[in-house]
Amino acid sequence: MLPSTVDRVPLNTASGVNARIRSHTRQSVIRTLQGGPRKIQRRLAELDREWDIERVLEANAATAVLVGFTLAFGVDRRFLALPIAVAAFLLQHALQGWCPPLPLLRRLGVRTATEIEEERCLLLRAVSEGAAGVPAGGGGASSAAG
């Protein structure tokens, strides 16, 4: 059975890496709330621009495919193996949530769209509740990367 879209990346990420990402999110929420309304607005704008893991993987795959085709047509046909391998890994990622660059990207702190959205929701909820609704530990940011 295939994992759900929301769970497939965290399920294929080491638990320590998931915990570090959740901790970073909680710390970011706390620092942002302590910075006041301007810092909150700046952070929300940063979250709007943050690339999630899917976008990073898609950009990397597209780059590898273009390089592979360029090398295949300009240097040696055997370079067609690169885009073929990339396509296979993208399919594997779509189905299972894992592909070779995933562990490295997650260790670098690249988050899922759900993890980014949870930080946004925590900040917006804190603003709407006058910052009283977010506990010191950061609240529910830990639920997505489980």
Image: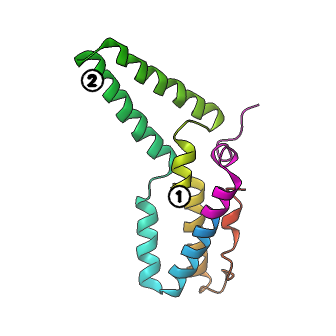
Left or right of residue 56, residue 103 in this image:
right
Q: What residue type is labelled 1?
A: Gly
Q: How crowded is mark 2: few (under 14 residues within 10 Å), some or many (20 or more)?
A: some
Name the residue that disc number 2 marks: 70
Looking at the picture, does residue 65 appear above or below residue 52?
above
Looking at the picture, does residue 51 appear above or below residue 87?
below
Residue 106, x across and y down, in percent: 56, 52
Q: Distance between the residues labelled 1 and 2?
A: 31 Å
Left or right of residue 138, residue 102 in this image:
left
| Residue numbers of the magenta segment | 1-21
Name the residue that disc number 1 marks: 109
Residue sticking out furthest to the left? 74
Of label 1 and label 2, which has the lower sequence position? 2
The quarter of the displayed image where residue 125 is located:
bottom right
Relative to the observer, which residue lies in front, 66 or 123?
66
Residue 64, x across and y down, in percent: 38, 32
Residue at image point 67% right, 83% down? 136
Relative to the observer, which residue lies in front, 112 or 121?
112
Residue sticking out furthest to the right? 1
